[in-house]
Image (cartoon, rainbow, N blue to C red):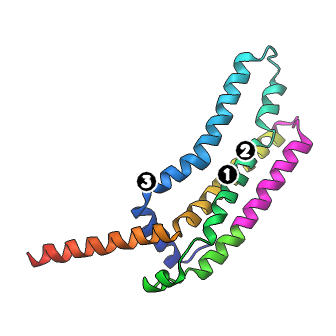
Amino acid sequence: MFTKIEKTLFKKIKESNTDTLFIWNVANVGFPMFTVFITFLFFCYTSKSSAIANYYALIFNGVVPLIAINIIVAASFFLIKFNKEKEEKYGLQTSNTRLKLILYAFGSYLLSSSLFAIQNISSPFLTPWTRWSQITLSFFAVYIALNISNKLFLLQEEMIENSYDKVITDNVKNLKGAIE
């Protein structure tokens, strides 16, 4: 998917921006999943029916693929939020990486949208195989969307600057320590 150079770039930027990336993930995955969990608990507590089909309908109503769609759409704004001159100053060439991410984001969006449509049109899923395949594909879609969105998020100008400022500061400290 990505070259060694691109993977190294993502790793370097991620190491310098872990806290910011964590907050991004909590806001885009944690809160929606928490909302689904609270809804499920509320439903379990207040439902007079113990029919398992009601619980399946709550899980397979397209909410998990919708979270994946939300993640991709929110991150897609970071595709245009970069400064080419600063990237060139740091010796970075991210045009191909950004193009790959656009294509992967579009593919993830299509997968998630398809799952959302299938779950809304075809529900309830009666066989265990269809239930497990739907839930597995849905969480896979969230995983893929999160992976792509994290990379998009990390390629922002601010994240790259933080990363390279930290590298420069660390190099100065090492040089200063070697001189003393």
Q: Which residue is mark 1?
A: 142
Identified by mark 2, the residue type is Val
- Give the farthest residue toward the top: 48
In whole angstroms, how far apart are the C-alphas of marks 2 and 3?
25 Å
In whole angstroms, how far apart are the C-alphas of marks 1 and 3?
21 Å
Mark in the foreground, 1 or 3: 3
Mark 3: few/some/many CA within 10 Å (<14, 14-19, 20+): few
Q: Looking at the image, which residue is at 74% across and 66% down?
A: 106
Please name whichever residue, 62 or 77, is drawn nearer the observer in this view of the structure. 77
Q: Along the polypeptide, which appears first: circle 1 or circle 2?
A: 2
Question: Under tag 3, what secondary structure?
Answer: helix
Identified by mark 3, the residue type is Asp
Q: Answer yes or no: do the residues labelled 1 and 2 have beta carbons within 8 Å?
A: yes
Mark in the foreground, 2 or 3: 3
Question: Under tag 1, what secondary structure?
Answer: helix
Looking at the image, is 158 positioned above or below residue 24? below
In whole angstroms, how far apart are the C-alphas of marks 1 and 2?
7 Å
Q: Which residue is mark 3?
A: 19
Q: Answer yes or no: do the residues labelled 1 and 3 have beta carbons within 8 Å?
A: no
Question: Under tag 2, what secondary structure?
Answer: helix
Q: Which residue is mark 2?
A: 64
Q: Which residues are magenta?
A: 105-128
- Where does the image place residue 17, in percent across and percent down from the top left? 43, 61
